[in-house]
């Protein structure tokens, strides 16, 4: 069995949902959440990701959208993204 590198922190994608920054904004959101906040279909977000036009990270094989990068791209605050999810 391979030994885990003690210098690498592995975050489960489900746990990532509860990791918040100082303003209680999630650090990442799902593609579906991003689509809902932007009022587009999830397929549109996946197309933007595929075309390199949209920021994303892979966590545990799942695509997640960093809220800070998305907010910068849109010229808004991260909190406004979360408000769009409500």
Image: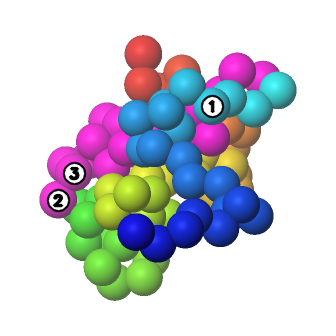
Q: Label 1 vs label 2: CA separation?
A: 26 Å
On the image, the x and y values in percent for residue 10 come to: 56, 53
Question: Is tag 1's residue or tag 2's residue first in the polypeptide sequence?
Answer: 1
On the image, the x and y values in percent for residue 49 come to: 36, 72
Residue hosting label 1: 19
Do labels 3 and 2 touch, CB within 8 Å? yes
Give me the residue at 33% from left, 49% from top.
31
Give me the residue at 39% from left, 57% from top.
60
On the image, the x and y values in percent for residue 26 come to: 59, 32
Spot the residue most to the front: 1
Indicate which disc residue 43 carries. 2
Q: Label 1 vs label 3: CA separation?
A: 23 Å
Colour treatment of the image = rainbow
Q: Which residues are magenta?
A: 23-43
Query: Would residue 58 appear left or right of 67 to someone viewing this image?
Result: left
**Figure quadrant of the N terminus:** bottom left
* Residue 19 to residue 27: above or below: above
Indicate which disc residue 42 carries. 3
Query: Would residue 60 appear left or right of 32 to someone viewing this image?
Result: right
* Residue 22 to residue 49: above or below: above
């Amino acid at each position: 069995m391979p030994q885990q590198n003690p210098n690498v922190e592995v975050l489960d994608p489900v746990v990532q949902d509860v990791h918040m920054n100082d303003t209680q904004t999630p650090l990442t959101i799902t593609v579906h959440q991003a689509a809902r906040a932007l009022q587009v279909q999830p397929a549109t977000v996946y197309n933007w990701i595929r075309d390199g036009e949209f920021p994303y990270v892979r966590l545990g094989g799942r695509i997640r959208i960093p809220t800070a990068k998305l907010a910068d791209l849109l010229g808004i605050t991260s909190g406004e993204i979360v408000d769009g999810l409500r």
